[in-house]
C-alpha cells in the first residue's frame, strides 16, 4: 500500500503469465534486454498483471480488472498462467466486497485488462463483477474494440465489455477526464489509439498508473523500447517523451502493469543525463 496525499493505493497481481519476450521487447535485441530481464528454461519471461485500487474520499476506484475468474483451465494453460484471481483475493483481504467498488476504469479493452469486468457465478454464468460500479473507457477505444481487425480480434473480445455498454453500466469518455477529484484519466496513445493512463495527485504528491504506455519499467526510461503489441509504436515513443519530464518534475510514483520485478518506481536522472526508474 502507498499513500499519495489523501489517497490510498493498493496494487494487486491478478495473474502471473510466462510469455515470449519477443512480445514484450519487440525490436529490441535479446543481447540488450537480457541484461535486465531473465527467462526460464523454456525461454519465457515472467510477467505480472497488475490492477490498482484507489481509495479516495470514501470511494473505491478500481483501475483495470485483469482476467478475473473467467478463464477456463485450457485458456490458463495455453497462456502459461501460474497465478490467478489475485485482485479478488486482494480486495477480500482489505475487507472490500465486489459490491463496494464504485468506479471501474478500463484503461483499454485488451482481454488481459478487462476480462475481469465479469465474474462467473455459482452456475458458471457471466455476471458483472462489480454490480454497483460505473465502468468507464474511451469512446474511440470502445468503437475499435467492437470492430476488431485481423491483428486485434484475438484480444478484443466483445463479451468483456459490450453487455456493460448495452445495459448502461459502461460509460464512454471523450478525451481526458477527471473521473474523481484529483484523479485524471488521460489519453496516452500508442499501445492503442485511445489507451488511457491514470494520473493521481493529492497534497502536492503524485502517482501514475501508466498501464501499457510502459508495460515494463524499462519501457518508461527508454523511449525507443516498447512492446510488439503497440499498434502505433512511434506514437508510444512521443507519448513517453511528453510524460518523462512530468515524472521527473513531480517525483511521481510510477506503476507498471506487467513488470513482475519492478511493479513501481520513480524516474531519476544521473549526472550524465541518463534516465533510470528506481524501484520503490
Image (cartoon, helix red, strand yellow):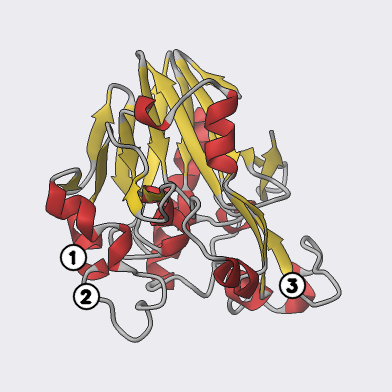
| Residue 139 as seen in the image, left or right of residue 199 | left
Residue under pointer 3 = 44
Per the rendering, the mark at residue 143 is 1
Q: Secondary structure at mark 2?
A: loop
| Residue 133 picture quarter | top left
| Residue 199 picture quarter | top left
Looking at the image, is 221 positioned above or below residue 225?
above
**Quarter of the rendering occupied by the N terminus:** top right
34 or 94, which lies in front?
94
Looking at the image, is 103 positioned above or below residue 135?
above
Q: What percent of the width, then of the height, locates residue 202? A: 41, 18
Q: Are marks 2 and 1 in contact (CB under 8 Å)?
A: yes
Q: What percent of the width, then of the height, locates residue 53? A: 47, 32
* Disc nearer the start of the sequence (1/3): 3
Q: What percent of the width, then of the height, locates residue 132? A: 27, 31
Q: Is residue 77 visible?
A: yes
Total marks in image: 3
Which residue is drawn at the image coordinates 34% and 59% (left, top)?
Answer: 109
Q: Secondary structure at mark 1?
A: helix
Within 10 angstroms of label 3, few (less than 14), some, or many (20 or more) residues? some
Amino acid at each position: 500500500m502507498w499513500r499519495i496525499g489523501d489517497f490510498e493505493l493498493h496494487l494487486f497481481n491478478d495473474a502471473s503469465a510466462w510469455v515470449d519476450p519477443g512480445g514484450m521487447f519487440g525490436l529490441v535485441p535479446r543481447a540488450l534486454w537480457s541484461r535486465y530481464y531473465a527467462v526460464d528454461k523454456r525461454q519465457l519471461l515472467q510477467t505480472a498483471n497488475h490492477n490498482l485500487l484507489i481509495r479516495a474520499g470514501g470511494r473505491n476506484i478500481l483501475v483495470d480488472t485483469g482476467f478475473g475468474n473467467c478463464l477456463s483451465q485450457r485458456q490458463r494453460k495455453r497462456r502459461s498462467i501460474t497465478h490467478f484471481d489475485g485482485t479478488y483475493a486482494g480486495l477480500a483481504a482489505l475487507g472490500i466486497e465486489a459490491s463496494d467498488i464504485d468506479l471501474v476504469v478500463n484503461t483499454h479493452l485488451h482481454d488481459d485488462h478487462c476480462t475481469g469486468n465479469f465474474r462467473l457465478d455459482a452456475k458458471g454464468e457471466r455476471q458483472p463483477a462489480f454490480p454497483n460500479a460505473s465502468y468507464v473507457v474511451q469512446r474511440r477505444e470502445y468503437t475499435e474494440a467492437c470492430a476488431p481487425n485481423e491483428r486485434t480480434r484475438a484480444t478484443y473480445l466483445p463479451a468483456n465489455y459490450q453487455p456493460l455498454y448495452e445495459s448502461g453500466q459502461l460509460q464512454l469518455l471523450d478525451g481526458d477526464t477527471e473521473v474523481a477529484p484529483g484523479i485524471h484519466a488521460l489519453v496516452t496513445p500508442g499501445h492503442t489509439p485511445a489507451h488511457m493512463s491514470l494520473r493521481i495527485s493529492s497534497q502536492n504528491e503524485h502517482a501514475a498508473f501508466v498501464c501499457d504506455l510502459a508495460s515494463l519499467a524499462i519501457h518508461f526510461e527508454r523511449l525507443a523500447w516498447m512492446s510488439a503489441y503497440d499498434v502505433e509504436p512511434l506514437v508510444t515513443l512521443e507519448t513517453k517523451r511528453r510524460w518523462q519530464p512530468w515524472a521527473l518534475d513531480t517525483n511521481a510514483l510510477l506503476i507498471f502493469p506487467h513488470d513482475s520485478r519492478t511493479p513501481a518506481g520513480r524516474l531519476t536522472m544521473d549526472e550524465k543525463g541518463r534516465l533510470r526508474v528506481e524501484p520503490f
